[in-house]
Image (cartoon, rainbow, N blue to C red):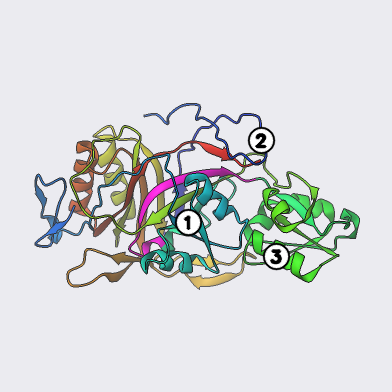
Amino acid sequence: MAYTSSLQLPTKHLLLPRPHRHTPSFVPAASKINGAPRVNGKVRINGDGENGSNGGHVDRIHLSVSSRAQDGSGLRVAYQGAPGAYSEFAATTALPGCATLPCRALADALSAVERGAADRAVLPVESTMEGTALRNYDLLLRHGLVVCQEVSLFVHYSLLAIPGVRAAQVRRVISHPMALAHCGRALARLGVDGEPVEDTAGALEMLRSGRMLDTAAIASPRAAGMYGLHVLAHGLQDESWNVTRFLLLSRPPPVTLPPPVDADAKTSMVVAHRGGSMMVLLKVLSAFSSRNVNLTKLEVINNQGQEGSDSSGTATGARPPVVILDTGARGKPTLRAFPHVLYVDCEGAAHDPRVREAIREIDKFAVFVRVLGCYAADSTVYDLQ
């Protein structure tokens, strides 16, 4: 029976009182979760051995581990949306001092990095209210970029309008579809319809440029000042704990000698296979548990024969296979399609002996393994209020 399931171990945070409105701050984590270039078509990790199983289908592993705190001066960061979007706030929180580059679509942001127009791209991947419904991992898999950093934001939603407009005058509310979904109960109480647009900050641009006096927008309260808008209401989100996790992507760094193993490092990977989903899942779990490696994320995607649906629940037919760019393929990068994939995040760097051996074991039974990135884990939730 085809299915899609997601098992995610929740990141544990302690929410502190809101810091100053214009000073991005952080909330320290309450506690930790318990717990290679190709050579002749094979994989060599850390230069001490080869994995020749099944023709060496583990994709190239890049061993650089990014620091959690980085100075963004001189870096250009591409993001989807208009200035004031949550993705832009994620960029400036993760890389203070960076220059931001707004893009119309997420694919444009990733392409900007690939062609050298930007140094990083911001990709929202998970939400505490929507899980991984953002489905942006699928976009990541189609590109040859690597994860170099993560950042999580506490998402506050506010209702914004042209100065002088009262809440009673509002007849519709515009925002990103996810923001509208996160504020469904608030919209019902207001008795207004939600109209989706491309992004939250883009809704503010529409509001201001069109002088819409019967319309309000849902966006970050921080963006209100940027667009000269008035806040009609704060805290519109249905759930008080509303956190979105973002990944920062970069071009693959040169493969060099690995840095010392960082105790706070995290490795993200995708494991693809064509059948026997439960057996593959159990083998992946065994590969890590037998080496006492903790997982922070495990998501199983089985698309073969599974019916999809749109936001209204209308059936859209069988879901397509997951397409992954094999960046280590002989000759040139090749797109490959798989009906079954596992997204895995584990504690430890890819060159940590325990993680390295787990990857080698998985390589023996999986059709394809691609390490998406090795970076410093950051369990902080940044509050922009």
Q: CA distance from mark 3 to mark 2?
A: 25 Å
Q: Residue furthest front?
A: 74
N-term-proximal mark, 1 vs 3: 1
Residue identified by numbered label 2: 20
Q: Residue at x 55, y 54 (%)?
A: 87
Q: Is residue 30 visible?
A: yes
Verify whether residue 152 appears in magenta. yes
Q: Give the amino acid at mark 3.
A: Glu
Label 3: which secondary element: helix
Decide which of tag 2 and tag 1 comes sooner along the chain: 2
60, 186: nearer the viewer: 60
Q: Is residue 203 magenta?
A: no
- Where is 14 relative to 244, above or below? above
Q: Residue at x 45, y 48 (%)?
A: 72
Vertical position of residue 265 compared to residue 115: above or below: above
Kind of residue at disc 2: His
Q: Nearer the viewer, residue 182 or 200?
A: 200
Residue 123 tag number: 1
Q: Nearer the viewer, residue 255 or 271?
A: 255
Q: Mark 1 or mark 3: which is in front?
A: 3
The residue closer to the viewer here, 282 or 329, is: 329
**Residue 187 location, x and y as percent?**
78, 54
- Write down the residue under mark 3: 205
The local crowd at label 3, few if under 14, some if 14 to 19, many if 20 or more residues have their Cα within 10 Å, is some
Residue range in magenta is 140-155
Q: CA distance from mark 1 to mark 3?
A: 22 Å
Q: If you read the primary sequence from the N terminus, does the residue marked by circle 3 or circle 2 appear first?
A: 2
Q: Residues within 10 Å of mark 2 (few under 14, many from 20)?
A: few
